[in-house]
């Protein structure tokens, strides 16, 4: 216990601090908890008048600093006793804008601030909502503030503070540039509060902030308010990843965990680990990890719920809930179940029963009542919000989520489980980075509720505990700028400050700041690589002849073989598509591969023209669903025909059972003598490959006994040469790269009439400056050429959808379109895109993304008032129906673009009227639920 003298000294220090920082003293009195050191340091910097960058782990309480900026703004309002700077004029009302990266976060922060300061003091501006926009404190998405700055909005008057929550979003490759635009363009009088996750180059980011914003204090905290314990689940055994905190700092994995996993791998290699189930008898090791229901049950028994279980797949999240339901898991009491039902019924009361059935409401509610739920972007937004509310209230105990949850709203848990350490990033399966691992596991441990948080990684033979230890212990999450000039940005910059000052502004971006710093390191790497390439070349040298020449022949053969394989795959797919298009109701076919392999009868040939054919079939195993050409390695062959009842209901178990029995009764072999093999390869050797192989065999180096050793060194050299060439291109392209790109964009815009020769912005340019979409120039060209004139509301919605929609995965064939005006408008749009792409290629600019036709049918049908089930079924999706969440998200983006067209000076009066009608037609049903939720 401290002495009276020590207590007196502490009181003196506290009084002196209160006198020096009176605003912070007022603010802290209302908090109900003591400020942490990093929070106090950041708030003191703010009160001194400095900008501040705060980097701290998820859940550490960074937002307290943002809320102090709100307090400072409100404290300086005119009705407060603060002396005016000029006695003749009253002090201007001070404002604070609180920006967030996503609407859900904006909504949450708005409600938090309203609860503290009252509805009259706080406003909200997002793409969907505009509430009290003239309030002294306004919460908004970052794009809204960017648009205000370019438009010179009067709302900016009196702006004193801008809080940029989650400022590390500026690394986002799609939207990150917006953060830099705002930071660069904010008036110098505005104090910037930047709140970021823990990043390893905070000092570099702060150095840049000082150059563009002036004095900026950097406050970095690595301390987690709730300690995080790391574990690995190996089969049925749970191990600590580290023995103690000291071992964690040294990355030393728990010896018992290492011993047990090595022993498990050894047993698997010897064949002991194979189960006696369906996988028995297969060659090689086969690991069966713990089942998802068992993991949840284990967490429940050990008191580790509520938990978020990250599964990097939407389908995997939904399947996990179904598996837990099938296992009979129930995590809630009778009182909790009643409260869950009450919350759900109050939130979905406006949704018609037929839509609820389409959305899988009853299965979803069954999971919720048992304390289980999925959370991913494919869900209807109101469903996600209900899951979030119930989880935060402790009613839902286990949520299976994709990684998007880690970047979104505040949903802390006691425990976080990672099923795998690999995720699909839209292009390939990639390992989690240390930054992503930290972000995901940072959800574990609720401040003020849990004494400690827990992160569990589920082990598999591919998972090395030492790799997990590296992820858990490494704090390498560097912030990398994704800033790139766009057409919209160029006309706005030129219109606001002029061409030359605009160039200077771009060169002051964080992207250019980083590029200039990184060139030195890249040049050194090029030099090291060049020396290594020479060493590899010496190792590859062969005394029999020119090995470079011999190796080039091997590479040419491999390239030709890959080209032929790709060509064969395309031909096989085309044959499968053609065979599926010929199917009729009652045809019995054989699905050669995949989960549904075996005999099946066609229930609906699905020749409606929505992209590739996906017939509805019933297998002899009683599964009913749609198959796609991807399920057929060979063309579908009609083996027999059976009668399908006229009004057959494939959702009826009894009807499925009877018809499946008829399929089995045909006597046909389920597998046809071979299991899902590839179609026979085309006989006959390729002439080019034959010639290359002849040259290879006659080359002197072919006889070298060390030929393969030389080839390995030559392959290493080839890869390193390719990497080094990329590095050289990066070095040459980095210095002044943004300004060069800007000059090319200005030249293209001048040629197309958006900028005058003297640098002035034309009427067309001013129209382009108010188009906020990735394909801004294409939209502007469509408006100028009248591509969308004369369309009906539903046709307009379909036509504009092609410039905003982007499929989650590439689909080989072009989606179909409603015939007539929509198809004509889209053809014109594609023609314009081709012209723009040619101009961009000629100038070395990144190409505008090609229009994607995959959303035209769904939004067209929706705008015409068709049922949700029919609309979702018409999506051009690889996996069948379009998820409701995806439909709502893309429909929102269509509505947003229609709103821009309705307000555009470049659109005709008739087109603006049609756009408003289209908005009304689209904003119904699930879109209306989303708006009101």
Image (cartoon, grey):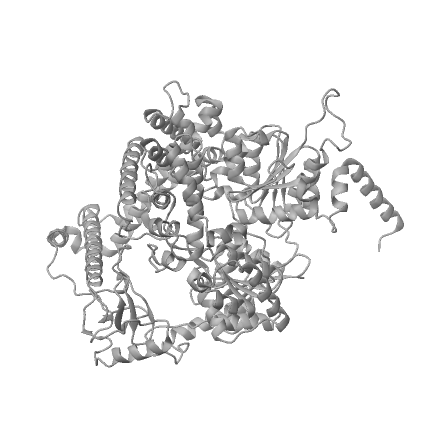
> Measured along the vertical axis of the image, is residue 403 above or below residue 174?
below
Number of labels in the image equals 0
Question: Observer-nearest residue: 434 or 725?
Answer: 434
Question: Observer-nearest residue: 221 or 165?
Answer: 165
Q: Residue at x 27, y 57 (%)?
A: 608
> Measured along the vertical axis of the image, is residue 932 above or below residue 141?
below
The image shows residue 639 at horizontal and vertical percentages of 18, 73
> Can residue 290 be seen at all in this image of the molecule?
no
Q: Quadrant of residue 97?
A: top right
In the displayed structure, does residue 497 sit left or right of residue 816? right
Q: Quadrant of residue 868?
A: bottom left
> Can residue 844 be seen at all in this image of the molecule?
yes
> Measured along the vertical axis of the image, is residue 492 above or below residue 773?
above
In the displayed structure, does residue 544 sit left or right of residue 500? left
In the displayed structure, does residue 269 sit left or right of residue 380? left
The image shows residue 830 at horizontal and vertical percentages of 28, 40
Question: Observer-nearest residue: 459 or 594?
Answer: 594
The image shows residue 862 at horizontal and vertical percentages of 39, 52
> Measured along the vertical axis of the image, is residue 664 above or below residue 556?
below
The image shows residue 523 at horizontal and vertical percentages of 40, 36
Q: Residue furthest top?
A: 758
């Amino acid at each position: 216990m401290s002495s009276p003298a020590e207590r007196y000294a502490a009181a003196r220090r506290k009084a002196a601090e209160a006198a020096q920082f009176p605003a912070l003293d007022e603010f802290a009195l209302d908090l109900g908890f003591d400020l942490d050191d990093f929070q106090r340091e950041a708030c003191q910097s703010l009160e001194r008048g400095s900008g501040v960058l705060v980097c701290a782990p998820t859940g550490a309480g960074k937002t307290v600093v943002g809320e102090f900026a709100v307090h400072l703004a409100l404290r300086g309002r005119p009705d407060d006793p603060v002396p005016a700077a000029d006695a003749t004029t009253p002090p201007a009302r001070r404002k604070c804008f609180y920006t967030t990266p996503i609407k859900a976060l904006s909504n949450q922060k708005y409600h938090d601030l309203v609860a503290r300061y009252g509805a009259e003091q706080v406003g909200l501006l997002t793409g969907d909502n505009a509430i009290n926009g003239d309030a002294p404190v306004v919460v908004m998405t970052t794009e809204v503030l960017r648009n205000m700055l370019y438009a010179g909005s009067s709302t900016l008057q009196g702006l004193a503070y801008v809080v940029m929550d989650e400022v590390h979003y500026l690394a986002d490759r799609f939207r990150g540039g917006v953060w830099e635009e705002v930071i660069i363009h904010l008036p110098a009088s505005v104090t910037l509060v930047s709140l970021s996750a823990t990043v390893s180059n905070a000092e570099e980011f702060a150095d840049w902030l000082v150059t563009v914003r002036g004095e900026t204090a950097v406050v970095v905290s690595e301390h987690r308010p709730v300690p995080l314990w790391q574990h690995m689940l190996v089969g049925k055994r749970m191990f600590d990843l580290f023995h103690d905190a000291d071992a964690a700092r040294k990355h030393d994995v728990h010896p018992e965990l290492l011993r047990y996993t090595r022993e498990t791998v050894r047993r698997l290699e010897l064949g002991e680990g194979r189960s006696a189930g369906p996988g028995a008898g297969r060659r090689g090791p086969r690991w069966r990890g713990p089942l998802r229901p068992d993991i949840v049950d284990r967490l429940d028994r050990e008191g580790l719920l509520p938990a978020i279980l990250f599964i990097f797949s939407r389908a995997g999240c939904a399947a996990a809930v179904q598996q837990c339901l099938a296992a009979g898991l129930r995590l809630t009491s009778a009182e909790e179940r009643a409260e869950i039902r009450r919350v759900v019924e109050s939130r979905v009361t406006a949704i018609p029963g037929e839509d609820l059935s389409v959305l899988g409401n009853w299965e979803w509610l069954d999971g919720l009542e048992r304390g289980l739920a999925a959370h991913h972007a494919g869900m209807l937004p109101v469903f996600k919000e209900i899951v979030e509310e119930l989880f935060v209230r402790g009613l839902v105990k286990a949520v299976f989520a994709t990684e998007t949850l880690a970047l979104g709203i505040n949903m802390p848990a006691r425990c976080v489980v990672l099923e795998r350490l690999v995720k699909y990033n839209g292009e390939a399966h990639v390992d989690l980075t240390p930054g992503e691992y930290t972000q995901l596991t940072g959800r574990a441990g609720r401040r003020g509720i849990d004494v400690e948080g827990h992160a569990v990684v589920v082990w598999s033979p591919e998972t090395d505990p030492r790799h997990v230890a590296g992820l858990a212990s490494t704090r390498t999450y560097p912030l990398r700028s994704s800033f790139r000039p766009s057409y919209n940005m160029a006309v706005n910059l030129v219109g606001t400050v002029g061409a030359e000052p605009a160039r200077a502004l771009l060169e002051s971006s964080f992207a250019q700041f980083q590029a200039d710093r990184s060139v030195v390191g890249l040049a050194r790497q090029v030099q090291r690589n060049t020396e290594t390439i020479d060493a590899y070349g010496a190792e590859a040298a062969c005394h029999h002849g020119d090995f470079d020449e011999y190796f080039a022949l091997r590479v040419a053969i491999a390239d030709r073989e890959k080209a032929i394989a790709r060509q064969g795959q395309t031909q096989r797919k085309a044959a499968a598509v053609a065979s599926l298009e010929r199917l009729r109701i009652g045809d019995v076919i054989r699905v050669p591969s995949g989960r549904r392999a075996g005999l099946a009868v066609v229930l609906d040939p699905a020749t409606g023209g929505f992209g590739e054919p996906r017939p509805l079939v019933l297998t002899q195993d009683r599964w009913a669903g749609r198959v796609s050409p991807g399920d057929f390695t060979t063309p579908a062959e009609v083996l027999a025909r059976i009668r399908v009842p006229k009004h057959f209901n494939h959702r009826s178990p009894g009807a499925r059972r009877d018809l499946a029995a008829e399929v089995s009764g045909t006597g046909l072999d389920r597998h046809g003598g071979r299991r899902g093999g590839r179609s026979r390869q085309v006989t006959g050797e390729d002439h080019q490959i034959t010639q290359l192989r002849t040259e290879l065999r006659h080359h002197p180096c072919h006889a070298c006994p060390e030929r393969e050793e030389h080839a390995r060194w030559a392959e290493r050299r080839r890869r390193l040469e390719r990497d080094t060439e990329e590095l050289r291109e990066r070095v040459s392209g980095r210095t002044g790269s943004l300004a060069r790109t800007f000059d090319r964009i200005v030249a293209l815009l001048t040629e197309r009439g958006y900028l005058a020769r003297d640098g002035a912005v034309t009427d067309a340019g001013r129209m382009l400056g108010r188009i906020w979409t990735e394909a801004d120039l294409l939209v502007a060209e469509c408006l100028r050429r009248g591509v969308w004139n004369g369309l009906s509301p539903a046709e307009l919605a379909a036509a504009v959808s092609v410039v905003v929609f982007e499929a989650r995965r590439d689909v080989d064939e072009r989606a179909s379109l409603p015939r007539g005006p929509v198809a004509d408008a889209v053809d014109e749009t594609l023609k314009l895109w081709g012209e723009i792409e040619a101009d961009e290629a000629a100038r070395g600019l990144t190409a505008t993304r090609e229009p994607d036709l995959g959303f035209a049918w769904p939004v067209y049908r929706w705008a015409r008032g068709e049922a949700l089930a029919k609309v979702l079924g018409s999506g051009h999706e690889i996996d069948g129906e379009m998820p409701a969440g995806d439909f709502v998200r893309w429909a929102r983006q269509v509505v947003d673009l229609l709103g821009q067209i309705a307000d555009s000076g470049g659109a005709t009066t008739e087109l603006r009227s049609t756009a408003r009608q289209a908005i009304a037609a689209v904003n119904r049903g699930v879109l209306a639920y989303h708006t009101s939720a």
